Image (tube, rainbow, N blue to C red):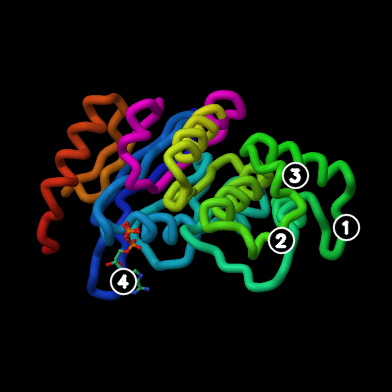
Amino acid sequence: MDNIVEAKNLVAGYGQRVLIRNLSFFVPSPAFVAIIGHNGAGKTTLFRAFQGKIDYQGQLLVQNHDLRHLSNPSGKGLLAYLPQKSVINFPIKVHDLVVMGLFRQKRFFENYTSEDYTLAAQTLELLQLSHLMDHDFTTLSGGEQQLVWLAQLMLQDAAINLLDEPTQQLDVYYKHQVFGLLQNWVDERRKTVLCITHDLQNLTHMRGFLLNLSRPDPKLEVISPEAVQENQAFLEAGRQPEV
Ligand SMILES: Nc1ncnc2c1ncn2[C@@H]1O[C@H](COP(=O)(O)OP(=O)(O)OP(=O)(O)O)[C@@H](O)[C@H]1O
């Protein structure tokens, strides 16, 4: 069977500074995977490797294809990425930004149709953002903007989604809602979600795996309240010195 995501002996970092040392893991079927670890542990660096933005040794595979030999995985609907922060400094309506999630189905300069806008509206409704549809995105709060980016990512409908701290700016209500939504996305739409997060409290109720990049030899662990608690204690004990 095809593994959805796989890392084989991955080594990555910046110049002399190696952050990911011989990381291997595989996700055999659609799943939620929380990527956790101290600040600077290399979580975003792992995502940069998946996006081909940094050099690395070893292999990264999606649906058994080596990413090095795969052209335009986002255009093919394999990979989508939600960065920690994206800045927009021109006025744009929320629904105009969200509908762009459908870019894969469009040719250059092809207009979005009313059906496209209906899909965008449905995704906004899922995130309880319908009231903001006509608002100028730049006037929204940080948390609202984060949710709008998430709506755009969901509309992309990619098989594997890399989310870099998607709940960082959200209030406790929305944090809980978004984790629930991600779980549904995996269970009902068969999506795979790799989610960088410091929000261990909300992981307790998730089904899937966690990968603690602060460990000397990180492995996928099945999420359970006990595993979350143990990782919380490990992270609270502080970082290990770099060698
Ligand atoms: N372009 C770069 N050149 C050199 N060092 C970098 C570069 N980008 C990041 N780093 C360093 O690599 C380390 C890991 O960064 P990374 O962003 O992967 O951490 P992280 O685990 O995502 O942390 P956080 O939880 O704070 O977001 C950091 O110490 C950072 O300063």
Judging depth in this view, the residue of 217 and 202 nearest the camera is 202
Q: Which residue is mark 3?
A: 120
**Residue mark closest to the camera, 2 vs 3:** 2
Looking at the rendered structure, the kind of residue marked 3 is Ala
Image vertical order of residue 225 relative to residue 59, above or below: above
Query: What span is in magenta?
Result: 185-209
Q: State how far apart marks 1 and 2 are (Cα).
A: 20 Å
Badge 4: how crowded within 10 Å, few (<14), some, or many (20+)?
few
Say which label, 2 or 3, has the lower sequence index.
3
- Tell me where residue 48 appears, x and y as whole percent: 44, 61
Tell me the residue at 50%/39% (across/down).
174
**Residue mark closest to the camera, 1 vs 2:** 2
Mark seen at residue 128: none
- Tell me where residue 20 appears, x and y as whole percent: 27, 57
Looking at the rendered structure, the kind of residue marked 1 is Asn
**Residue mark closest to the camera, 3 vs 1:** 3
Q: Which residue is mark 4?
A: 14
Q: State how far apart marks 4 and 2 are (Cα).
A: 38 Å
Q: Quadrant of ligand 1?
A: bottom left
Q: State how far apart marks 4 and 1 are (Cα).
A: 41 Å
The answer, for residue 104, to whether it is visible in the render is no
- Tell me where residue 54 appears, x and y as whole percent: 42, 67
Mark seen at residue 111: 1
- The reply to whether discs 3 and 4 touch (Cβ–Cβ < 8 Å) is no
Q: Which residue is mark 2?
A: 136
- Tell me where residue 144 appears, x and y as whole percent: 57, 51
**Residue mark closest to the camera, 4 vs 2:** 2
Q: State how far apart marks 3 and 1 are (Cα).
A: 14 Å
Label 3 C-beta lies within 8 Å of the nearest ligand 1 atom = no
186 in magenta: yes
Q: State how far apart marks 3 and 4 are (Cα).
A: 38 Å
Image vertical order of residue 85 relative to residue 222, above or below: below
